[in-house]
Image (tube, grey):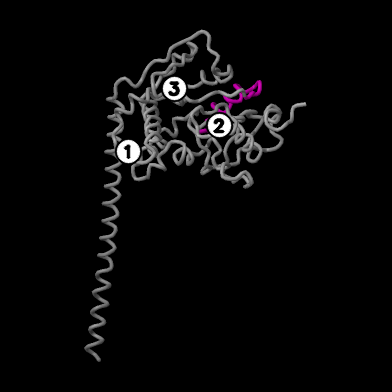
Amino acid sequence: MRIQGGSNGSTRSRRQASSPTTCLLLIFMLVALSRSQIFNQQLSSEEFSASVKSCAGFMKPVATTANFRRYPQQILEILTEIDHVFMLSFEPCELALPEQLARRATCIVGSELDKCAPSRYIAGEFTHAMKVSFAHAAMIEISQRARYRHVAIIESDAIFTSAELSVDAVTGFKNILRADDWNLIRFGYRPYFSEESSRKRCARSCRCYMDTRFSQDFCKLDGTGCDIRSSDFYLIHSSVFGQLKAKLLDLRNPNSKRIIDTWPIRTTSKQWLLVPHGTVQRTLDIPFDYQIGLQSLYVKKCVGPRPVPDHIDTQFFRTPS
């Protein structure tokens, strides 16, 4: 009996002695894994930066015109407040801009940039979407190098609607811009969450609040996580250049989470939306009328407080007499 007791005591002693060693080994392995991931991310970031820097021919000047009518006048005035405008097109940009805007605009030729993209960033599922997302990351990279405070990104398939803005839309936009309480301002967007069912209540993360003393044309999302898609026209603040670019390039995530208008934008805070949205997309999988109808449904369910400003109410909810 004594021998057995001594054996148990010896076993307990060995277990107690080995416990700290096991913990230290686990900690060491976790630290090594973390350092390895950081090192791999640094290599990935360096590879991406080098591929953009060495790429030739994907940045082109934008032509000028004195007779420009494609964008509403208020949108043009808003864009002149932004440090730089990127026009993303698969082929060289056909669109010409007024001279005061063209001077601060660059055409990004997607077909040329695609040739420079390391294959691991665009391979696998959703190849086209990954190429577009790579281009958005490249525009952010260029913006960081140029030390822009904010930039606008407009995709070539964006078509401006006939939506009316308030007479003070530009002033309201300047209020938001100067308040520095924003990361993204989206002029085109798709309330994707509402396409599954129009009967569900608006989730809290999708609610958008207007302060008419501040602006009668923009609302601010209550948080992050709302499945609002589209990247056809948005402004991005330098405070999230690095954060958004990192999400687009994080190869630890599946491709579905690196598409620009899914997880990367969805998880970005301080988003403002133009109400009603200013653009629809030519190449989307749903027609124009459906895009506008979804916008009306979104404003009806998620934008507040009620009543919304009169110019919004008139366009969406009142039956013409």
Numbered circle sitting on residue 87: 3
**Stretch of the chain drawn in magenta:** 163-183
The nearer-to-camera label among 3 and 1 is 1
**How busy is the neighbourhood of tag 2: few (under 14 within 10 Å), some, or many (20 plus)?**
few
Tag 2: amino acid = Pro
- Where is mark 1, residue-wise? 123
Residue 198 pos. (x, y %): 62, 43
Tag 3: amino acid = Met
Q: Is residue 8 above or below residue 101?
A: below
Closer to the chain start, of discs 2 and 1, is: 1
Q: CA distance from mark 2 to mark 1?
A: 29 Å
- Where is mark 2, residue-wise? 287
Q: CA distance from mark 3 to mark 1?
A: 24 Å
Q: Residue furthest right?
A: 321
**How busy is the neighbourhood of tag 1: few (under 14 within 10 Å), some, or many (20 plus)?**
some
Q: Secondary structure at mark 2?
A: loop
Residue 20 pos. (x, y %): 27, 66
Task: Check if residue 247 falls in the magenta segment.
Answer: no
Task: Check if residue 179 falls in the magenta segment.
Answer: yes
Q: How many marks?
A: 3
Closer to the chain start, of discs 3 and 1, is: 3
Residue in front for this viewpoint, 110 or 73: 110
Q: Is residue 17 above or below residue 191?
A: below
Residue 61 pos. (x, y %): 39, 15
- Label 1 near label 2: C-beta < 8 Å? no
At 26% from the left and 73% from the top, the residue drawn is 15
Q: Does residue 29 appear to the left or right of 177 in the view shown?
A: left
